[in-house]
Image (cartoon, rainbow, N blue to C red):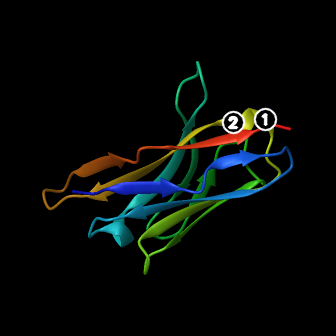
């Protein structure tokens, strides 16, 4: 069973930076596709960034050029470096793992979320 624990959220001024971390307790981290989602109040959860096991990355257009997703397989941790933060980045950020199973399927796991608030 994969358990994901996020950290690094908080309050930051516009233009500031934060780095989110997500520690994965499962045994297949290096095989997982890892994603960050976010959900603002009253809005649907949206995909922010993806990193594959081959370290290919993809970003939502709203964060491209400002956010960077990376992974450290030795630490079973995925990161989201967020720069030039804007008030519209305010949301709860969730880590998501897509893990291969022995039966050839994909299992999805979620962290509990970490709050990011961008405000003067």
Q: Quadrant of the N terminus?
A: bottom left
Q: Which mark is residue 95?
A: none
> How far across and down, in percent of the image, does residue 106 sit?
26, 51
Q: Does residue 113 lie above or below 88 as drawn?
A: below
> How far across and down, in percent of the image, does residue 114 sit?
53, 45
> How far across and down, in percent of the image, does residue 107 sit?
26, 49
Q: Quadrant of the C terminus?
A: top right
Mark 2 burial class by Cα count in 10 Å: few <14, some 14-19, many 20+ = many
| Residue carrying label 1 | 87
Q: Does residue 114 lie above or below 32 as drawn?
A: above
| Residue carrying label 2 | 90
Residue at image position (13%, 56%) is: 103
Seen from the viewer's position, the closer of residues 100 and 22 is 22
Residue lying farthest to the left in this orientation: 103
Mark 1 burial class by Cα count in 10 Å: few <14, some 14-19, many 20+ = some
Secondary structure beneath label 2: loop
> How far across and down, in percent of the image, does residue 78 sit?
50, 64
Residue at image position (61%, 50%) is: 9
């Amino acid at each position: 069973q994969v358990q994901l624990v996020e950290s690094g959220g908080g309050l930051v001024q516009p233009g500031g930076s934060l780095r989110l971390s997500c520690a994965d307790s499962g045994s297949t981290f290096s095989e997982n596709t890892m994603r960050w989602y976010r959900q603002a109040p009253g809005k649907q959860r949206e995909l922010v960034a993806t990193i594959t096991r081959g370290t290919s990355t993809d970003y939502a257009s709203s964060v491209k050029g400002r956010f960077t997703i990376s992974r450290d397989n030795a630490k079973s941790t995925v990161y989201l470096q967020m720069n030039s933060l804007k008030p519209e980045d305010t949301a709860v950020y969730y880590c998501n793992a897509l893990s291969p199973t022995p039966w050839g399927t994909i299992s999805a796991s979620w962290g509990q979320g970490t709050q990011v608030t961008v405000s003067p």
